Amino acid sequence: MKLRIGIAGLRRGRTWINIFSQDNRSDVVALCDIDQSLLEEFSADEKFTDFGDLLAMNLDAIVVCTPPACHAEQTVLALGNGKHVLCEVPVATTIGECQQIVEAVNKSGKNYMLAENSCYSDMHLSWKSTVADNDLGKIIYAEAEYVHDCRQLMKGTDGTLTWRASWPPIQYCTHSLGPLLFITDDRCVSATGLSSGSNVAPDIGAIDLEVGLFRTANEVTIKILCGFSIERHPAFHWYIIYGANGVLESQRQYNDPVSGYYQATKSDQEMKFYQSNAAAHGTAENRVASEFIKSILNNTTPAIDVYRAMDYTVPGICAHLSAQKGGEIVLVPDLRIN
């Protein structure tokens, strides 16, 4: 029996339509978007402009790809209606919403997975193996940056500001912080944040850049820089992990090699793969979908379950709160116990 999948939000959702339709374990049977013209671009058994109508369908799972302000409410509703949920990043907008999602998952008994595709890139999966094999020794420091000029996406065709214009950059940290925590099997316990303010796009009030400095449960320091209204082209992700015995570093420009240095070999190593485009789209999404499907069919916990999702998300919320307080340290709650 194939899983019956519904997808809400078709701008980002078009990617998941293709992926779940191509997997022989799932069928996309229902679509939902408030834009009727988007619905007309795709074929499906049922199409809706109202999320409530999607919830009423006989579905195994719903993929939530709507704007972030909708994620928490729609996730909680889907879980409450007996659907498994795959949710696009970010998880939610506030710690309170994150707590609501955790409670809904525990109450429903259904699977929740965050669609953090960057964790499933070739590079990050390779790095996870390297760290697990202890080639770097004790992990002591890590950094990541995601800089992507999205100003063209901050206004609709009618000039109305989209969610991206007001979104705090450091709260879109899952593509950066997520892989580092995924690779090192760690979580943040405190956050400090600072903001550059709005200098590049003051007409729309978008924050240029935000930086977060985090301390983890394993006493690792992590620095994350995110910016989405900044003069920087092309867009890029960059990562570096320092261990007691070596370092792993991604490329600064596409087609540059990914490098590693291990004390065991006393030599630099050029890794035999290259990161894909800025958002790591492509094969990574197929791996996310496969993990989600497998977890439902086998009744197992997905790799990026609700608690991992919160580990990757809540620190960014705390870092922005810190930035609003001039850089005060903010403790990061562990929603497993809070």
Image (cartoon, helix red, strand yellow):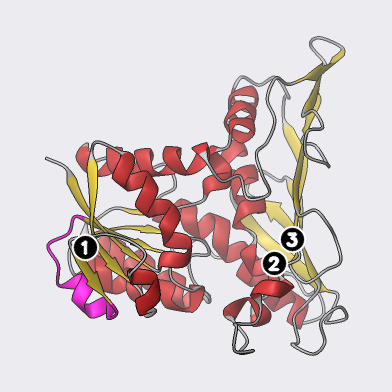
Mark 1 near mark 3, Cβ–Cβ under 8 Å? no
Can you see residue 84? yes
Residue on which disc 3 sits: 148
Residue on which disc 2 sits: 170
Examine the image and state in which quarter residue 180 appears: top right
Q: Which quarter of the rendered picture does the C terminus lie within?
A: bottom left
For this rendering, which residue is in front, 219 or 280? Answer: 280
Crowd class of label 3 (few under 14; some 14 to 19; many from 20; radius 10 Å): many
Q: Residue 186's x, y, as percent?
A: 59, 44
> Which numbered mark, 1 or 2, is in the foreground of this view?
2
Residue range corresponding to the magenta coloring = 49-60
Direction from residue 167 to residue 17 in the image, left or right: left
Q: What distance separates the C-alpha of mark 1 from that of mark 3? A: 37 Å
Direction from residue 299 to residue 236 in the image, left or right: right
Q: Earlier in the sequence, mark 2 or mark 3?
A: 3
Examine the image and state in which quarter residue 104 appears: bottom left
Q: Residue at x 63, y 68 (%)?
A: 171
Dot 1 falls on a residue whose secondary structure is: helix
